Image (cartoon, rainbow, N blue to C red):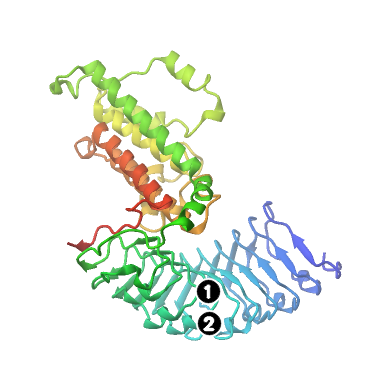
């Protein structure tokens, strides 16, 4: 392949290539696009890759590459797109990043990168629009020099070990639209964010932010649509009126476009609401009005009804595969079928629907099972276990709303599958929670008066 010296585009993505990247690729001097993403390529990135002087797009994402990223890669002055996400790269991000003045997007998410962000990482990067460094082990403070990235629109630093205050210089980012800083150790007030007139979405969950929110959030941040400060130490009073900053005709024009990205998860949630209601209503029918019968009679759905509802178990109607092993274990070990067993089964079904995994999946070996796998993801980024089909086809700020709502759904599923039956919710509680999640999801995305939300803080 190294003899194809006139080749300007090479895309081998979405295959099953293994071993390492052949050094002979460095002979393709006219190459402008190199896409090896979604394979099983291993080993290090060879230093000679920096010889591709005309390279504009370099996509090595979703492989098994490891080691340090060669400094020569950061000297590719023509590079515009650098996708290295979801590999095993280690080491730090060098300050030579600023040697790529044409760079527009850089994605290094889900690697093993450590150290601090370069203090001058935005020097000489006038075209940089999108940075995703999430899912690493980066530490230290967010450099104030980030405001020098005048074209920056999307900044994702989720799930790292960053600490310290937000730099006051953040208020000087003229084009920033989305900030994702969740799952870090950031502290201090949030005031710099509310000076950003272009900011639409801020995900600040699971940090140590404190202080109060400004009473007039929309004075300067008049484009703000979504902000989440779940699990922080923010206090004081809730700003009034609490409503989306961007209202009116602009919102109405975008509603139809947004709904296109909402269809699949909304349909799934609605079906689950209906099924929960069916479980609850049928149990009430069998049990009668006497609450003392709540733990006596099981709910059964006749086989004929299942056959009709699923069109004879057609796989096109499959939302999640059966977890009969888990259900039998739950019922068999107790010797009885109970209401709490129904809840447990429903919780397993929820986990299957939203992860597209079943308890008997081949990935669950050596003691790993569906529930612990999801629990581990909940401690970091739940998006890594969600069914990608539920997240695709969305604008970035809609994606945030999807992730938040689906995360709540998975938390509900885990609560339904608590080891102790006494700690599980009732089906009535489940139905209430599902309706609340569905309503909240619509409110966040289509812009009802409650679409901005502030949760689990010390706000009074």
State left or right for residue 399 relative to residue 421: right
Toward which corner of the image does residue 371 lie, by quadrant? top left
Residue 172 place in picture, x, y as percent: 44, 81
Total count of labels:
2
Q: Residues within 10 Å of mark 2 (few under 14, many from 20)?
A: many
Residue 386 place in picture, x, y as percent: 46, 48
Which residue is nearer to you in this view: 226 or 220?
A: 220
Which residue is nearer to you in this view: 163 or 147?
A: 147
Q: Secondary structure at mark 1?
A: loop
Does any portion of residue 356 appear in the rendered image? no
Q: Residue at x 28, y 42 (%)?
A: 415
Which residue is nearer to you in this view: 444 or 415?
A: 444
Residue position marked by numbered label 2 in the rendering: 122
Q: Earlier in the sequence, mark 2 or mark 1?
A: 2
State left or right for residue 407 relative to residue 429: right
Q: Residues within 10 Å of mark 1 (few under 14, many from 20)?
A: many
Quarter of the image with the N terminus is bottom right
Could you give the CA–CA distance between mark 2 and mark 1, rounded to whole angstroms?
A: 10 Å
Q: Residue at x 27, y 57 (%)?
A: 455
State left or right for residue 75 relative to residue 5: left
Residue 78 vertical placement versus 239 (above, below): below
Residue position marked by numbered label 1 in the rendering: 152
Q: Disc 2 vs disc 1: which is toward the camera?
A: 1
Q: Residue at x 40, y 76 (%)?
A: 139
* Identity of the residue furthest to the front in this view: 249
């Amino acid at each position: 392949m190294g003899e194809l010296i006139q080749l300007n585009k090479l895309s081998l993505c979405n295959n099953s290539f293994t071993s390492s990247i052949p050094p002979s690729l460095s002979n393709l001097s006219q190459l402008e696009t190199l896409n090896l993403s979604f394979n099983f390529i291993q080993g290090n990135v060879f230093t000679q890759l920096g010889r591709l002087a005309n390279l504009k797009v370099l996509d090595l994402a979703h492989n098994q590459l490891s080691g340090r990223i060669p400094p020569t890669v950061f000297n590719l002055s023509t590079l515009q797109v650098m996708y290295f996400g979801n590999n095993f790269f280690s080491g730090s991000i060098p300050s030579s990043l600023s040697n790529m003045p044409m760079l527009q997007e850089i994605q290094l998410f889900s690697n093993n990168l450590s150290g601090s962000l370069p203090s001058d990482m935005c020097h000489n990067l006038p075209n940089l629009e999108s940075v995703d460094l999430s899912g690493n082990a980066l530490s230290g403070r967010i450099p104030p020099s980030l405001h020098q990235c005048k074209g920056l629109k999307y900044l994702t630093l989720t799930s790292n070990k960053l600490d310290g205050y937000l730099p006051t210089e953040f208020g000087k980012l003229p084009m920033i639209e989305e900030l994702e800083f969740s799952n870090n150790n950031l502290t201090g007030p949030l005031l710099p964010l509310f000076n950003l007139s272009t900011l639409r979405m801020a995900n600040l969950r699971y940090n140590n932010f404190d202080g109060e929110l400004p009473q007039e959030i929309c004075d300067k941040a008049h484009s703000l649509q979504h902000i989440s400060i779940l699990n922080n130490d923010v206090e004081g009073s809730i700003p009034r009126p609490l409503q989306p900053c961007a209202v009116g005709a602009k919102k109405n024009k975008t509603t139809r476009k947004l709904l296109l990205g909402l269809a699949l998860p909304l349909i799934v949630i609605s079906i689950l609401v209906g099924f929960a209601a069916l479980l609850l209503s049928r149990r009430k029918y069998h049990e009668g009005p006497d609450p003392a019968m709540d733990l006596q009679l099981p709910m059964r759905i006749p086989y004929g009804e299942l056959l009709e509802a699923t069109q004879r178990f057609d796989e096109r109607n499959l939302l999640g595969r059966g977890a009969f092993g888990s259900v039998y274990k739950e019922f068999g070990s107790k010797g009885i079928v109970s209401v709490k067993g129904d809840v447990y089964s429903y919780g397993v079904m929820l986990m299957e629907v939203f992860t597209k995994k079943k308890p008997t999946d081949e990935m669950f070996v050596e003691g790993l099972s569906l529930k612990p796998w999801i629990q581990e993801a909940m401690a970091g980024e739940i998006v890594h276990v969600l069914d990608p089909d539920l997240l695709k086809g969305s604008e970035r700020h809609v994606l945030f709303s999807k992730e938040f709502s689906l995360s709540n759904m998975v938390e509900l599923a885990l609560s339904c599958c608590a080891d102790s039956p006494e700690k599980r919710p009732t089906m009535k509680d489940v139905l209430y929670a599902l309706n609340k999640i569905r309503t909240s999801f619509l409110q966040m995305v289509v812009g009802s008066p409650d679409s901005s939300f502030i949760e689990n803080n010390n706000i009074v």
